[in-house]
Image (cartoon, rainbow, N blue to C red):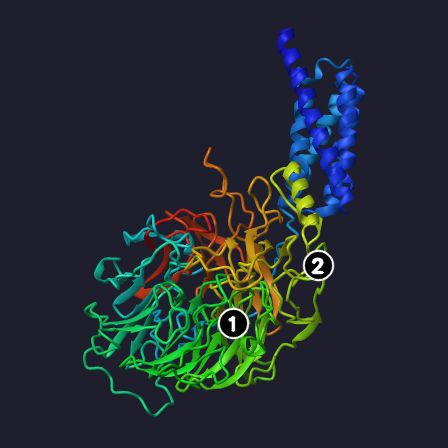
Amino acid sequence: MPSNIKSIARTLTIVVMVLAALFFVVGGGWLLALGGSPYYLIAGVVLAVVVRLYARGQTSSLWLYTALLLGTIVWGLWESGTDFWALAPRLDIWFLLGLWLVLPWASRPLPNAGSAKGLLSLSLIAVLATLGFSWFHDPQEISGSLARAQPAQAAPVAGIADGDWPAYGRTQAGVRYSPLARINDGNVGQLQVVWTYHTEDFKGENDSGETTNELTPIKIGDRMFICTTHQFLDALDPATGKRLWRFDPKLKADRTFQHLTCRGVSYYDGADTAGNAASVDKKLSTVSAECPHKVILPVNDGRLFAVNPDTGKACSDFGKDGQIDLQANMPFPYPGGYNPTSPPVVTGSTIVIGGSITDNLSNKEPSGVIRGYDVNTGALRWVFDTGAQDPNQMPGGDTQFAHNSPNAWAPLAYDAATDVVYVPTGVGTPDIWGGDRSELKERYANSMLALDASTGKLIWNFQTTHHDLWDMDVPSQPSLVDLKRPDGATVPAIYVLTKTGQVFVLDRRDGKPILPVTEKPVPQTVRRDPQTRGEHYSPTQPFSPLDMGPHEKLTDKEMWGATAFDQLMCRVIFHRLNYEGIYTPPSENGTLVFPGNLGIFEWGGMSVNSDRQAAFMNPLGLPFVSRLIPTDPNRPQLEKGAGTEQGVQPMYGVPYGVNISAFLSPLGLPCKQPAWMTVAGVDLTTHQVVWRKRVGTIRDSLPKLMELPAIKAGVPGLGGLISTAGNLVFIAATQDNYLRAFNANNGDLLWEARLPAGGQATPMTYEVGGKQYVVIMAGGHGSFGTKMGDALTAFALP
């Protein structure tokens, strides 16, 4: 090798080691001063000695570096166990530097370096062996098997054909389970695309940052109904994907809308084939001659349409020209301020609907009132205003709904046998400061409400978070399950999934816990900050033994990064934030919120196979940071909407704004180590997690410099899952663009297919002409960062 090249290689080696040593000494000293691990400072000092010895041409530099590398392996295993993704950033930089040192152009200047190079080479092999072993011994995954086999014949659901999917959760009980088994664990690997429908509806330049398509289609007989991002309602032939008609509600959206999405539509059929069994209410209205059947379409600008499923025309005898103005009688109304983001419940007589209110904008917002409308005429039948003294008081004259009432943006559930609708509620906005909230405004916040679907009268309520300052809404459609006891008795239960990861299991007759609920003390102090102005904190919060969230508070051992450099910075940032575990109060200094604003559970809910008494869930785990910004509560309001759920939120009318962001490294990667999402199988007789698997790869998360292999990590996801009698669980949701099928019995990955865009939606399955299909909307998600698209894709066996 020419001497000038050797000189350059030696100089480059010294410069790189000096810079690395300096970074670890300074950053490691900072971390140690904050109470963190001493490893980085020690490693920096040792590396500084290594570079000094190397610069002097001493072979002992390789011996010392070998000791540092072996010590790092021991330290990494001690901190993280055999977790590949936790070990990788602890070892990667050291491995690459060690590999460089054993190469001829770096080690040639060192005399008699053969033995030292040999031992260093063995230590490099030890790094690879450690990572290889950890790849196959993942401490975060649980390997187990559900004890009960799938019955030979799945139990039918009254009023629903096995091949149909007539409601958002297939049934309005929110179970997301199909009795179809033509596609099963033995042949799912043969699935292929059979048709793709392009909506041709894309995000526009003036659309909200939270523009998404979170659609779950519905299918009744020979029709499939979908809604698009801008709420076009399309009827499709489910066998071919051909459009039969399109209805345009003429949505008037702009960038100030906090949400622009459609999760789905609802269906009314007087013959009850959609599972909306006739209400027990005797005052049923006369069935419409023009529209005896209806597709019910919520529109983001605050309207609700009824459309004839045969013709695609609005039902002129419903409301006014086929639509209802959901902004009527609202305080402080503005376009997008009240936004129906989920398909309503439809009973034999009533449409029950809630909606979203703009988070963290102002203390002068519309109401989150829940309402029941006559399914045939559109007349308002009842209200339940969660912030009013009398929640059932009908508006009239000058009477309006209560402003900033807790809303119900997630899908509702319905028990047709008892005519009870179950309503998950959120917190009254502003979400992150609640010093001005009255006891009345918090009475029904963050709760599960059981209402008479025909009258709106409260039957019971259960609160999941007290005095919420973290946006811990009840975010998912609850699931109604008839639990079978060992003695043969059946208990009607409701499963309430929360952003905190608590799964509350209640008797749906009276709201009493089936699994015990414990009130536990939670943090009350704001470290590094004075008491937040005008605020107070709940001394306890409710916890369930079925907890899919973090069982213990995060430590700096769980901080992550692509390399040791950004992992160190994540540890420093972690220690500088306020964090004492779940429910740490918001602060001006900045509070680590974990579970984060996305929650452990989101709107996807869970799937329940009652035949096997098993449930399937996809819990998420991404910390966020909230930082209160002192401001003048009397400043004039300059905005009419937020346009996003992240970034600076103004919170007009209160003494703080808030900046909400994901907890990310300087390289933009999550500071908490993976897995960020898993899929899990739960035995409902024991309420134990039987299996848990990471889901999703890093393939679509890094710069597209090269086609990377699909390495399983457990990446973030938004969307739900479904299960079938074919012993399968289907899920998309993840930040990589895949639809996957898992073995419902043990969680083994059986099949996966690339999607043309992000699949932040819940799949659906149905049957036509003896052929079973699985469909997923690949529309992407604006704020989640996945590729945007317009493709509804159907898979079937060849």
Few, some or many C-alpha atoms within 10 Å of disc 2 (few <14, some 14-19, many ≥20)? few
Secondary structure under tag 1 reads loop
Q: Quadrant of the N terminus?
A: top right
Task: Determine the image quadrant of residue 367.
Answer: bottom left
Task: Determine the image quadrant of residue 725.
Answer: bottom left
Is 732 left or right of 674, judged from the image as shown?
A: left
Tell me if label 1 and label 2 are in contact, CB under 8 Å.
Answer: no
Tag in front: 1 or 2: 2
Q: How far across and how far down the image is residue 760, in percent?
A: 43, 55
Q: What amino acid is at disc 1?
A: Arg
Q: What amino acid is at disc 2?
A: Pro
Marker disc for residue 749:
none
Q: Earlier in the sequence, mark 1 or mark 2?
A: 2
Marker disc for residue 612:
1
- Name the foreground residue: 67 vs 701: 701
Is 274 left or right of 743, judged from the image as shown?
A: left
Q: How far across and how far down the image is residue 731, in percent?
A: 46, 57
Image mark count: 2
Few, some or many C-alpha atoms within 10 Å of disc 1 (few <14, some 14-19, many ≥20)? some
Does 792 appear above or below 154? Answer: above
The residue lying at 41 percent from left, 56 percent from top is 187
Q: How far across and how far down the image is residue 578, in percent?
A: 68, 55
Name the residue carrying label 2.
530
Give the CA separation, mark 1 to mark 2: 53 Å
- Name the foreground residue: 732 vs 744: 732
